């Protein structure tokens, strides 16, 4: 006998005589910003496709991102707007498409206030008080006059009217995350002495105005249950503010947390427990409104738990369904899905352009995703390397119909993910490797470990395997450390050292494997993670790097917990903007002439020994193809000189698979003899 899942139960919203709307289940997409719109706030085909795909997956409510109500409230270069009537036709096309898939359509209306910056919006920013938001850019806002406060209230109402005209069923007022309404609530940003000094006053005027403009819509409000900074709104103070809200005009509350100064609360690290806001949610039951909840809802199990226990009435999902819309089917029906690993590349991309994803290379790349073409029957592909790039290429090609063999000289698939997944700051990375293994089994990918391949002789590899195409996903060559004494046996590549000392990453499970001290040369993201992890295990750390900041290739959210820990740990010494010139076995001499004690092993990170990728990918592909007689392509960030992070490796593997699939779909089979992949005999070499 099967029990119906709580997530699959319908939920009806609407009260006080308003027309009720019924969600087909308890799953809503959160208002996650993506930068998929145009520079003037219009929606695009790419964005419509993205949202409709998630509606088709089965969401009950599909929500746009924070959508600005007036041009001076725009916070992102390609953010959606509801600031003029010209936005309505495009958004009507979206809502019609969402309704056709059976989902309710929701929009979150917002104004950036002090977080909006003139460099993005083209307008001077405005706020309750002239308090800059340093994290957003530091522009000092002009303090709103009384009349301007009321003008902004009216702008929210006009946006709500446009939302109704565009066919939205649900309007969510953004009262969280340090944006304008939240700024009026917070003692950090509201120093006023007039009527708007009351933290609830602006919020209530907006609620009233939006309800008047949209009398029959389902209207809710997003709330940060805690602001985050020590001098911000506490959980108790936020409850007191909401107790004064005009709740009779609302149909639900949707709880989140954090502000720009406490971004770790808005998009939580993988270090934090799933359902992290559940304890806060219980206090919001006192208001008697249906309650939505966000916050590390990254598995069907935690979603079922919070719904079954009555912690909330529906869940707001962002990263999980960004990583894979099939997550919806995983929650509702136990289907397979690609897991989010909480790396926060998505949120960190917002300041750079379109929001992408580490594990899902098809999203956020300035296009509607193009399916990998099916290959002709019997196509055989060999992928060399079982790291993130190789596993991605192998899966994509197997999905396209190829018979895929993966060769790797390691002891387990995953490459450097096998190390990253055991770092303190990236504990969810194991989910990618586990999912990849399950996908390999499902698709019949033959993974052969402990197999060395001579990639300098690809033609021999083709002869040995009978491959129709080859993907080389082995990364680049790492030069030796370039300083006097760099050839010492105590100088080791950081990844090789970790692989040889698994007890370090297991918390010292193997006696003596966590050293008393360690020196790290380089300050990239790998060095940061290793330093943070070994320091957490009790080691003293000296971190020296040529970078001006730690892990410059990573975004703020990816290092929002690790860097402060390193800065505040008295056993950690950090020297940035410095080069090691000499190592004598116990000390290092920096380019400044300073000598520092360098205890323990000296570990060299990739940032100071860059990968060799001097030949452009297109030229290398052409040379290798000519030599091998079949399509050969390279995967790995080295070929495009992109930062060597997992997100770029996965994208590179995906792109390599698409190139190979296109070649195999277009080329005739020919009469070239092949060997049966089951009989491959690569015992240590393919030369």
Image (cartoon, rainbow, N blue to C red):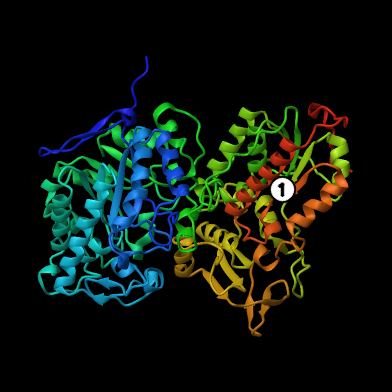
Where is residue 654? Give x, y as percent: 63, 45
Q: Is residue 12 above or below residue 507?
A: above
Q: Which residue is mark 1?
A: 473
Q: Nearer the viewer, residue 49 or 568?
A: 49
Decide if residue 501 is on the left or right side of residue 63: right
Can residue 449 be seen?
no
- The one nearer the camera, 315 or 633, is 633
Work out whether residue 354 or residue 242 is closer to the camera in this orientation and state it. Answer: 354
User: Between residues 314 and 214, which one lies in front from this camera angle?
Assistant: 214
Picture mark count: 1
Q: Quadrant of residue 667?
A: top right
Is residue 474 at least partly visible in the picture?
yes
User: Taking 659 as reference, is 570 above or below it?
Assistant: below
Query: Is 138 on the left-hand or right-hand side of 493?
Result: left
Q: Residue at x 76, y 75 (%)?
A: 484
Residue 104 image position (x, y, % from top left): 30, 38
Image quarter hosting the C terminus: top right
Q: Position of residue 186 (x, y in %)?
A: 22, 65
Say above or below: 685 vs 245.
Answer: above
Q: Is residue 268 above or below residue 672?
A: below
């Amino acid at each position: 006998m099967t029990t119906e899942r709580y997530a699959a139960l319908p939920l009806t919203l609407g009260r006080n005589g308003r027309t009720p709307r019924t969600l087909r289940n308890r799953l809503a997409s959160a208002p996650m910003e993506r930068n998929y719109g145009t520079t003037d706030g219009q929606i695009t085909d790419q964005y419509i496709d993205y949202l409709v795909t998630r509606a088709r997956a089965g969401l009950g409510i599909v929500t746009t991102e924070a959508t600005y109500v007036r041009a001076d409230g725009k916070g992102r270069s390609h953010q959606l707007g509801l600031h003029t009537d010209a936005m309505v036709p495009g958004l009507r096309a979206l809502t019609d498409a969402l309704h056709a898939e059976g989902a309710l359509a929701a929009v979150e209306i917002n104004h950036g206030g002090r977080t909006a910056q003139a460099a993005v919006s083209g307008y001077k920013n405005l706020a309750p008080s002239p308090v800059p938001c340093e994290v957003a850019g530091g522009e000092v806002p002009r303090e709103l006059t009384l009349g301007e406060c009321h003008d902004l209230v009216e702008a929210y109402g006009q946006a709500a009217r446009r939302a109704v005209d565009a066919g939205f069923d649900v309007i969510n007022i953004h009262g969280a995350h340090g944006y304008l309404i939240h700024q009026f609530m917070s003692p950090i940003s509201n120093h006023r002495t007039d009527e708007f000094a009351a933290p609830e006053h602006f919020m209530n005027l907006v609620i009233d105005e939006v309800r008047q403009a949209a009398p029959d819509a389902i209207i809710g409000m997003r709330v940060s249950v805690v602001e985050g900074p020590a001098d911000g709104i506490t959980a108790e103070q936020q409850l007191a503010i909401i107790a004064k809200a005009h709740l009779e005009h609302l149909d639900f509350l949707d709880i989140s947390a954090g502000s720009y100064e406490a971004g770790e609360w808005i998009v939580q690290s993988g270090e934090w427990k799933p359902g992290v806001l559940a304890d806060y949610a219980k206090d919001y039951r006192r208001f008697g409104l249906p309650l939505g909840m966000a916050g590390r809802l990254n598995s069907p199990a935690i979603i079922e738990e919070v719904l079954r226990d009555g912690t909330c009435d529906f869940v707001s999902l962002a990263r999980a369904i960004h990583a894979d819309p099939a997550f919806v089917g995983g929650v509702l029906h136990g289907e397979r899905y690609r897991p989010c690993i909480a790396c926060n590349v998505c949120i960190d991309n917002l300041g750079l352009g379109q929001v992408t994803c580490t594990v899902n290379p098809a999203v956020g790349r300035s296009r509607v995703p193009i399916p990998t073409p099916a290959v002709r029957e019997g196509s055989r592909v060999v992928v060399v390397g079982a790291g993130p790039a190789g596993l991605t290429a192998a899966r994509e090609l197997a999905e396209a119909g190829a018979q895929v063999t993966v060769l790797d000289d390691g002891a387990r698939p995953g490459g450097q993910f096998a190390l990253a997944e055991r770092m303190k700051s990236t504990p969810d990375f194991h989910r990618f490797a586990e999912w990849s293994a399950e996908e390999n089994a499902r698709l019949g990918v033959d993974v052969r470990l402990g197999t060395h391949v001579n990639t300098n002789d690809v033609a021999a590899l083709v002869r040995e395997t009978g491959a129709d195409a080859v993907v080389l996903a082995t990364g680049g060559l790492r030069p030796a450390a370039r300083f006097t004494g760099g050839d010492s046996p105590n100088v080791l590549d950081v990844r090789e050292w970790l692989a040889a000392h698994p007890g370090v990453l297991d918390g010292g499970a193997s006696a003596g494997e966590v050293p008393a001290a360690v020196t790290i040369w380089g300050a990239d993201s790998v060095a940061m993670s290793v330093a943070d992890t070994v320091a957490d295990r009790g080691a003293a750390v000296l971190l020296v790097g040529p970078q001006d900041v730690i892990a410059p290739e990573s975004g703020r959210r990816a290092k929002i917990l690790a860097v402060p820990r390193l800065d505040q740990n008295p056993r950690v010494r950090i020297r940035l903007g410095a080069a090691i010139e000499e190592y004598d076995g116990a000390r290092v001499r920096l380019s400044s002439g300073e000598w520092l004690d360098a205890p323990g092993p000296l570990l060299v990170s990739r940032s100071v020994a860059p990968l060799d990728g001097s030949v452009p990918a297109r030229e290398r592909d052409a040379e290798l193809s000519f030599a091998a007689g079949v399509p050969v392509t390279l995967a790995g960030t080295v070929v495009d000189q992109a930062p060597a992070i997992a997100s770029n490796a996965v994208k590179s593997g995906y792109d390599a698979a698409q190139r190979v699939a296109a070649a195999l779909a277009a080329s005739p089979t020919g009469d070239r003899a092949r060997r049966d992949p089951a009989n491959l005999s690569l015992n240590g070499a393919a030369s």
